[in-house]
Image (tube, rainbow, N blue to C red):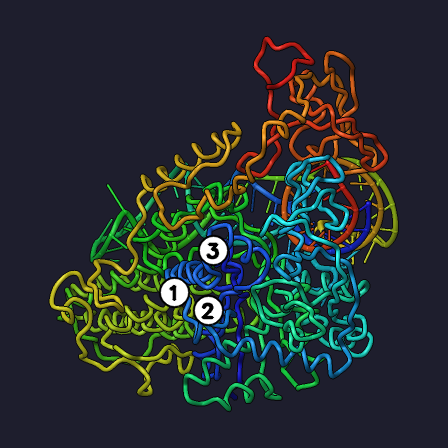
Amino acid sequence: MTETVLVTSALPYANGPIHFGHIVGAYLPADIYVRFRRMLGDDVHFVSGTDEHGVAITLKAEQAGVGYEDYVDRWHESIKRSLEHVGIEFDVFTGTSHHRNPFHRELAQQFFLDLKAQGYLGKHSEEQFFSEAMGRFLPDRYVEGTCYHCGYEKARGDECPHCGRYLEAQKLKDPRSTLDGSTPVLKETRHYYLDLGRARDEWLKDWFESKRGQWKPNVENFVAADLADLRERPITRDLPWGVPVPGENGSDDGEPGKVLYVWFDAPIGYLSISKQYWHAQGRPERFEELWKGADTKLYHFIGKDNITFHAVVFPSMLKGTGQGWVLPENVPANEFFNFEGRKFNTSSGWVIPEEAVADDPTDALRYALTTMMPETADSEWTWEEYRSRVNDDLADNLGNLVTRTLRFVEKFFDGRIPALGELSERDAELQQEARKAAAEVQEHLHAFRFRRACQAMMGFGNACNRYYDLEQPWVAVKDETTRSRAAQTMRVCCEMVRVLAHLIAPVMPETSTTLLRTLGRDGESPSFERLGELGGGAGLPEGEIVGAALTGALPRFVDPRGREISAPFPKIPEARIAAELERLHDLAKRQDAGTGKHSPGSDADATPVAADLEPIADEIGFETFAAVDLRTGTILEASKHPKADRLLVLRVDLGFETRTIVAGVAASYTPEELIGRRVIAVVNLAPRKLRGVESQGMLLATDDAEGRARFLSPDAGSPNGARIR
RNA sequence: GGGCCCAUAGCUCAAUCGGUUAGAGCAUCCGGCUCAUACCCGGCUGGUUGCAGGUUCGAGUCCUGCUGGGCCUACCA
């Protein structure tokens, strides 16, 4: 019974590289699942692409001084390469921007219109800054002004980079546009909102209840909490880059252009990318057959940060249009993946460098990543674990099984597959093991238990090795009376190598192909059908040449790209692991020392660190600088703010007086370690109450590579109260 | 601040509805083997399930509090 299956992987945001945390969370499991379902004969369609709109991309592109298209193109290519490196094979991987995917704009707009027609969209007015010079609304990030909390003059409309607070742009003092330098005015703008509460009351809650017990517990818990507090969400923005809101393109009562909020248009990308694909295939009707098919099963592979979105919001959109789009069958979200004890962090270089694994077989990476997959809880990549998985599982268990089998056949049977005789009890047992393994692998993969599936594969390799040892063909072959028994053993082992090749195909497609080729089964499609069946015409042809005799000489393996390799799985030498660990220890030391950001190395394609830094602000006159009164001081007391998690209340000796200053550094310093710390304070700033405690100034600080605040200190020798010039 | 999740052997992870003596792999140690990538096979060792209470005939699992970590969200430095 074949099924129609749609699989999506979260759309990576085209604003930076992806790392193994992303891959192991949403791409590798999806790819394995897709290969698995195809092995079962299901009709599978696998879609992803880059998410290319939103304020972050708009801003970054403008900062970099490149066009939006060029900017997203760069990251699109980078991300695509990273995914190819681990063998992720989508049917289609494009994106959401118009130049890459001409179907997206139209479809996203259609969603908007359908939801509007169904009464799911509300429209509310709010005040937002508007540049009269440019005739356009300014997103909060493009407005700069004086922070109404700390007095910092270069605060952005959404957030103050100095004090770190999120701001309401309308309240900024002395606002100015960073786009044209003009003074913006507050003007009313109207935005559309999606009524999620209505979706919940009408059907979402019931639908979710019907899924109870089928989804992962963490996903269900999350959704249950969300359903209790669902409200309207704005779905439009005033931005120059994105999908224009229908009927709002500057024509509607002189209103400047609006675009769909990126969260709204991004998931529609799953559909539009698919639509683009089927049009290119010359089968445009296939798109709706799939996405509106009553029997279609839709699976969203995502990381845990995306649960609400794919289990609540996007289904509400799909259903709300009234167009009969298919709802997800399951949302197999993974938890987070860490790296040697810390979170992956691209900008600080705390990542697995692609060049570090560039020469490793794709399948070794895929297998190791799968065994470490954060299926039920956060998990971790360690280099030692990687080496252990590759060397112990792949090389020693599976690889060696293949090698010892083929070498034996070459050595004693002219490299030809021996005839199959009557099955001994042990032969039959192993055959049973093969069937069991095939059943287990299928069962686990159906349930998204990828780690367990790998364990089942290894367990089977183990059973084969045990069989080999018990049979002792190296003894039997030397005696004419038992030689036929050795032949039978090797025949069975050859069959089992073939079973293995099929079993591992979802996780290790390249090696699967390599093994089949070595057995003379070039082009055989992986399948679970009749797997392990000995006799009855299902087995390998007797007398067929395998291994080295097939390829002419050692090496006896040829990978799918036609390269000869000496072993199915080369081992990873310990020295390599040591080198990687050394790099990380150096990195950790530098980060802990707070030396600031640094390049991750020679990788030209790594995150452009410079682009992460704030752009240099506009030139100011000396008077402006001189207006800020900076003094040296010493922290006398420090305590946690009674009503705010992130704040510390400090008493600072400024020479002429002791002041209370509230600082947002609770995540960066403990109160104790700040006692006696020399600092630099702005002392002529208007006092401000921060959750009940008045702050009489602010302290200069910068961020380290981990994003933690670090106070600046004066040199020893300058007394408290000395002016900074 | 609100919501959710996690903490199990030296390491990485399991454990179905609350149910037998908490299991695997790796590492360590012991033994066997020589076809094979110094591999394979067998065996031993290793646990107060983060801490403190509670419910129950029975708790890794449920409840409360605490400690540490993560995700979302609010407020905000």
Give the class, few, some or many, for how many residues have Cα within 10 Å of label 1's Cα (few <14, many ≥20): many
Look at 65% across and 21% down and name the residue there.
Answer: A679
Residue A220 appears at what percent x and percent y? 71, 65
Q: Earlier in the sequence, mark 3 or mark 2?
A: 3
Quadrant assignment, res A511: bottom left
**Circles 3 and 1 on the same subunit:** yes
- Comparing A668 with A358, the one in front is A668
Please tell me the numbered disc located at residue A31.
Answer: 2
Quadrant assignment, res A70: bottom left
Q: Quadrant of the C terminus of chain A?
A: top right
Q: Earlier in the sequence, mark 3 or mark 1?
A: 3
Camera-near label (3 vs 1) is: 3
Instruction: Report helix, strand or loop for mark 2.
Output: helix
Q: Is residue A259 above or below residue A167?
A: below
Which residue position is annotated with label 3? A18
- Comparing B27 with A650, the one in front is A650
Instruction: Give the chain of mark 1.
Output: A
Look at 60% across and 67% down and name the residue there.
Answer: A332
The CA distance from mark 1 to mark 2 is 8 Å
Amino acid at pointer 2: Asp
Instruction: Report helix, strand or loop for mark 1.
Output: loop
Instruction: Give the chain of mark 2.
Output: A
Amino acid at pointer 3: Ile
The CA distance from mark 3 to mark 1 is 15 Å
Residue A366 visible, this orientation: no
Instruction: Give the chain of mark 3.
Output: A
Which residue position is annotated with label 1? A87
CB atoms at circles 3 and 1 under 8 Å apart?
Answer: no
CB atoms at circles 1 and 2 under 8 Å apart?
Answer: yes
Horizontal side, residue A70 vs residue A486: left or right: right
Amino acid at pointer 1: Gly
Look at 75% across and 75% down and name the residue there.
Answer: A121
